[in-house]
Image (cartoon, rainbow, N blue to C red):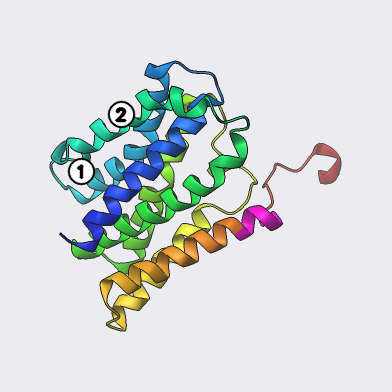
Amino acid sequence: MSYLVVIEFLAVIVSSIYGVLLAARKGMDVVGVFAVAFAVAFGGGTLRDLFLDRTPLFWIGNPHYPMITLGIAILSGLILRFVHRIKPLLLVPDALGMALFTLTGTGFAIEAGVNPFIAAVLGVITGTFGGVLGDVICNEVPTLFQPSPLNATCSFAGAWIYWGALQFEIPGGWALLAGGAVIVTLRLASVKWNWCFPGIREPSPSSKS
């Protein structure tokens, strides 16, 4: 079993947990929780597979993935009964899930022989667009598209670190660890110190005169 398959398996679990926590903030029932968890866990990877023309889609080829997500959604009611505040818990599974899926997306793109820049972009898509779909289902403006602590930038940087490590013939496991460490560290640091890009707005009429 390759490193990427193991990382992908872990990414599904962590992202499903993040989706459960996201849905729980909206007070959804188990169907809603599963829908959000499913979107978060498989949204970005589905786009990656479609762009790379990989068939079957990774969660169809691995039917135990959505089964795991369903199991986590069903058990969420019992688990969350002992949780008093959900928001502080979102950061860790968000950062880990983003890192794990970014690396799998980049890795599978590299295996497909695409350009390194495109591989990094597909890594970002895999790592972040599940969260975008989760936010949309929860009727929120995706944090990826508004001034907020760095998100996609962390994925992009980690993807390049992973690719660069492979070019120096560093073993795959260590290359994944290096890329993942960069993504998680940058993400946690950006939240702690509120690193974000400014919003771009249309100039007000007064500023034009």
Question: Is 53 situated above or below 75?
Answer: below
Q: Would you call the spot at circle 2 few (<14 residues within 10 Å), some (14-19), or many (20 or more)?
A: few
The amino acid type of the residue labelled 2 equals Gly
Against 160, residue 8 (above or below) is above
Residue under the point 58% across and 54% down: 150
Q: Residue at x 38, y 37 (%)?
A: 16
Position of the N terminus, as image quadrant, is bottom left
In magenta stretch: residue 190: yes
In the rendered structure, which segment of residues is drawn in magenta?
189-195
| x, y percent for residue 141 | 57, 32
- Depth check: 197 or 44 in front? 44
Vertically, is 190 above or below 161?
Answer: above
Query: In terms of image quadrants, where is residue 130?
Result: top left
- Measure the alpha-carbon separation of dots 1 and 2: 18 Å
User: Which residue is at the front of the view, 176 or 113?
Assistant: 176
- Counting residues from the start of the chain, the first of labels 1 and 2 encountered is 1
For image coordinates 34% across by 59% down, the residue present is: 103
Identify residue type, mark 1: Phe
Residue behind mark 2: 71
Q: Which residue is mark 1?
A: 58
